[in-house]
Image: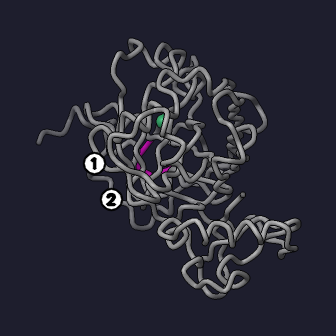
Amino acid sequence: MRLATIRTAAGPRLHVRGRSGYVDAAGESGNLELATLAGLLNSGPPAWDSLRALETRDGRPVEESDFQAPVPAPARVLCLGVNYSEHARETGREVPNWPECFVRGAPSVAGPYADLVRPALTERFDYEGELGIVIGRGGRYIRPERALEAIAGFVVCNDASARDWQRAGTQWTPGKNFDGTMPLGPELVTADEVDVADVQLTTTVNGEVRQSARTSQMLVDVAHAIEFFSAFTTLQPGDVIATGTPGGVGMGHEPPLWLVPGDIVEVAVEGVGTIRNRVVDEDPQHVSRSWLPAASSSRSL
Ligand code: ZN
């Protein structure tokens, strides 16, 4: 099943991809709890079954601009960094023997076709095409062989990063949390519909292939990512896990290929979908330039 969150006159609502178009989940099932993905994730198997019945209906066509992130406001996005050895090498790091990880918050998430806003305070804005996992049931101390039971499905994401902010300190939080820098979607593809163990991941910028890899090249695979994060935190319904990016990011090129306004970035994961975002500049009107990593040498705390 393919689930989308679509902007309507009544606000964002959960939809199921039908035989054609998209079918309003709450409206057509008669279950008001299914108006949002959060409502679905807190419901039991009968709710899922009622949505599966909608897959054969004809829905309405939807404009790309009406797609929101299928998980519109995740409580957190748990991210793996340096999870492909080629990406480790291109960023001058050792291949890690322990998962590198960081957290994004909901304000950093954006729609699958939304404008990707290049923050005014970065000169080094970069893309990272990734496979995302959406947690369904969740839990703690999840064994790899039971990981699938904890997962609702998969999304495509772009972990777009302000490299100068990421590298200014040792923690990655600011460089990875500028508003709207993680487009996500276009649909949540349920785990029974796609096997992501070995699928193609491709990122293009203006049609030029920059990243091309198989998900089987991950250092920590999906099942072990679930096991790792659930070793220290209870995974909650609606949490998202971003599984890291392969080689070919902008900073890995010589000279680096930073994103500039007008660029079209596409990330495709075979069997899951394609997100596409146009890079635009942040509205400069309210920007304060009191913190700029490039000028950090002249600033003392
Ligand atoms: Zn990443």
Image quadrant where one finds the C terminus: top left
Q: CA distance from mark 2 to mark 1?
A: 8 Å
Rate crowding at label 1 as few (under 14), some (14 to 19) or many (20 or more) other CA atoms within 10 Å: few
Q: What residue does disc 1 label?
A: 291
**Residue beneath the point at 66% across and 24% down:** 214
Residue 242: x and y, percent? 49, 41
**Residue beneath the point at 78% across and 36% down:** 207
Start and end of the magenta stretch? 118-122
**Given the current orientation, which residue lies at the most extreme front position?**
46
Under 8 Å from ligand 1: the CB of mark 1? no
Q: Do callouts 2 and 1 mark residues in contact (Cβ within 8 Å)?
A: yes
Rate crowding at label 2 as few (under 14), some (14 to 19) or many (20 or more) other CA atoms within 10 Å: few
Residue 29: x and y, percent? 69, 81
Identify whether 151 is placed above or below 73.
above
Q: What residue does disc 2 label?
A: 288
Residue 17: x and y, percent? 77, 64
Identify whether 66 is placed above or below 278.
below
Please, what is the three-letter code of the amino acid marked with disc 2?
Answer: Ser
Asked if one can make out residue 12 in the rendered structure from this viewpoint, the answer is: yes
Question: Quick check: is 124 in the magenta stretch?
Answer: no
Identify whether 6 is placed above or below 288.
below
Query: What kind of secondary structure does the magenta stretch mostly adopt?
Result: loop
Q: Nearer the viewer, residue 174 or 186?
A: 186
**Residue beneath the point at 49% across and 69% down:** 38
**Residue beneath the point at 37% across and 50% down:** 139
